[in-house]
Amino acid sequence: MHETMKKNPLLLAIFATFVMVLPWVLGGFFENGNSWLRAVDFALLYILLALGLNIVVGYAGLLDLGYIAFYAVGAYLYALLNSPHLAEVLPAWLSHPPFLVMMVLAAIVAGVFGVLLGSPTLKLRGDYLAIVTLGFGEIIRIFMNNLDRPVNITNGPQGINHIDAVQIAGYDFGRPIEFLGLTFEKIHLYYYLILAFCALIIFVSMRLQNSRIGRAWVAIREDEIAANAMGINTRNVKLLAFAMGASFGGVSGALFASFQGFVSPESFVLMESVMVLCMVVLGGMGNIPGVILGAIIVSITPELLRDIINPLQMAIAGKRVVDPENLRMLVFGLAMIIIMLVRPEGLWPSKRRRAELHPKTKEIALQEKDSLQDAERNHD
Amino acid sequence: MTDVLLKISGINKRFGGLHALSDVGLTIKQGEIYGLIGPNGAGKTTLFNVLTGLYQPDEGEFTFNGKDLFRKKPNVVVEAGIARTFQNIRLFANMSALENVMVGQHVRSVTGVFGAILRTPKARAEEAAITAKAEALLAYVGIADRAQELARNLSYGDQRRLEIARALATNPTLLALDEPAAGMNPKETDDLKKLMEKIRADGVTILLIEHDVKLMMGLCDRIAVLDYGKKIAEGVPEEVKSNPRVIEAYLGVAPE
């Protein structure tokens, strides 16, 4: 996507305009435009998450099933510092930090948690790593659930309420703002805010991908022993991947908490980790446009199905036969299975992944010829 | 020519009950091609892995270029100046040939996360230097025209060359090659021999494991012979060839 756009400024301009007016298009064309915009806002948050997980899974090849824990860390950090819950015990300088300070703090704290998860798992790969990270994700959630005793920190299963929206340059994003004759509601404001963060994180991902660090990540994914034997300090480089991925998750979590105004452990269940992983795998591991596409599809499709299934049932059977919630998971699951069977490299894969999983027939023929020649040689 | 570059002594390595290396010692001098031969299972690759940090020896001493490398990690060993290739090729299969060589320069470059994100002038200059050097190294080993090809799509001989280029990218003082001629035809073996002589002429010391005894005799300045984890001979090729213990190890004892 970005390559074509770099070559074609007109395309980029059209795309940018589309993105900028999308909230008003939704509001103008759909009756329930606001609920659609809300879904889009969440899709953007998922893009942030998926891009973060892409660094860990897509670049460095470290299968992380507990990624949502970092989202939780960011969200709870924001919640604790920006709600009345801890207001009495927090020192004044720590309460309601300025917006940018808050975001950097969320990134750093989540990054530290990333290193905490990474350091004991350095020698693990594949299945084993997946199990440990899954456990880590659950530990964080269960902590959030139970840290209301003996000292009430997280308010347990009830979660933290009355979280203030962000304030930027004196504007409270929780209230409508009039600008250019338009009324920017909270969902509009957050749309642009999260969009800006998406742009930032896409930029960071792209820069990292084509750098010495990005190459080291891919090298570790390809062959960790060889990477180490070529002088890459695999321990540090893997920890860096965990920390970078986690910090993206932390920022996303902080935005989520401020947008939602409420956090509870329920938002950070294993299913969420699985969904984010699905976005990365379905879209195309290691490819930024692919991951974005995956995040949009996986987060929007259920919403679409919700709007389609009920009217469809009414039209066909005249009544609600099945709960749309169940049916959409069924449809969604089936779609995942089919896509993974037909396109294991994802919908929009990187060149590398495509070559790995769908080698062109010509290449196969060449390889076979080579290995045949090798066999003959060895035979001699 | 007489400066000692690498010195190990009393190296022991056990895998459970198997004493893979017992009391092995050798010295490699600056600028020579040093060969390591021995029958299958003699411990050549084990010793090789000890020398490149992949295995941690149980006892012994290991100094290289004045640095103590005993029980150091592979990346530390590479930083000290020992680079290696693998017996069964271990390239980064889904990276291009050029990227493979660029990865090799990781240890000699410094750009971190912030440099990469902000693309500072320093980071950009370093990136350009890395690319230029990678291209030069591909040309050096003779596969410049395959730069954009994925490593997995290269022919077997080119993959061997690419592994050497990737190892050279770490700026080694000692290049350790594990059976580089395995599976090559005579023509390719000959080209490889020329390449190794060129590398040596450019000031890199070479440590070589090889099965092809004829190649070794013609190429190496000195040879060590391993058998059952022990060094049974060391010296110039002529000496080694006529050493009765070596003949015994390779051919068995002649019946009376």
Image: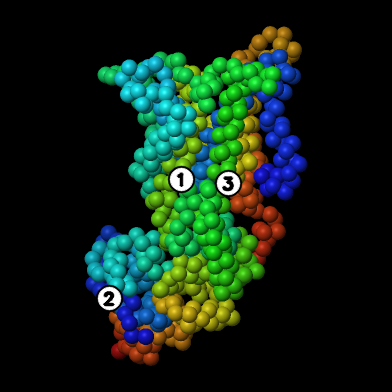
Q: From the viewer's perspective, is residue B127 above or below residue A71?
A: below
Residue A206 shows which numbered tag?
Answer: 3
Whether residues under marks 2 and 3 lie with C-beta atoms below 8 angstroms apart, the answer is no
Amino acid of disc 3: Met
Judge from the rendering whether residue B30 lies leftward or rightward of residue A378; answer left or right: left
Viewer-side residue, A161 vs B31: A161
Letter of the chain that mark 2 sits on in the rendering: B
| Circle 1 residues within 10 Å: few <14, some 14–19, many ≥20 | many
Left or right for B123, reference A139: right
Q: CA distance from mark 1 to mark 3?
A: 14 Å
Is B128 drawn above or below residue B30 in the view shown? above
Please rate how many residues cluster around mark 3, counting C-alpha atoms within 10 Å: few if below 14, some from 14 to 19, many from 20. Answer: some
Kind of residue at disc 2: Gly
- The chain under label 1 reads A
Q: Nearer the viewer, residue B153 or A87?
A: A87
Residue designated by label 1: A241
Q: Quadrant of residue A293?
A: top right
Same chain check for tags 2 and 3: no
Quadrant of the rendered structure where residue B152 is?
A: bottom right
Label 2 Cα neighbours within 10 Å, binned few <14 / some 14-19 / many ≥20: some
Q: Which residue is the site of mark 2?
A: B25
Alpha carbon distance from label 2 to label 1: 40 Å
Q: Earlier in the sequence, mark 1 or mark 3?
A: 3
User: Mark 2 and 1 residues: CB-CB less than 8 Å, in contact?
Assistant: no
Residue shown at the point (56%, 52%) measured from the top left: A210
* Residue B1 horizontal/vertical position (percent): 37, 85
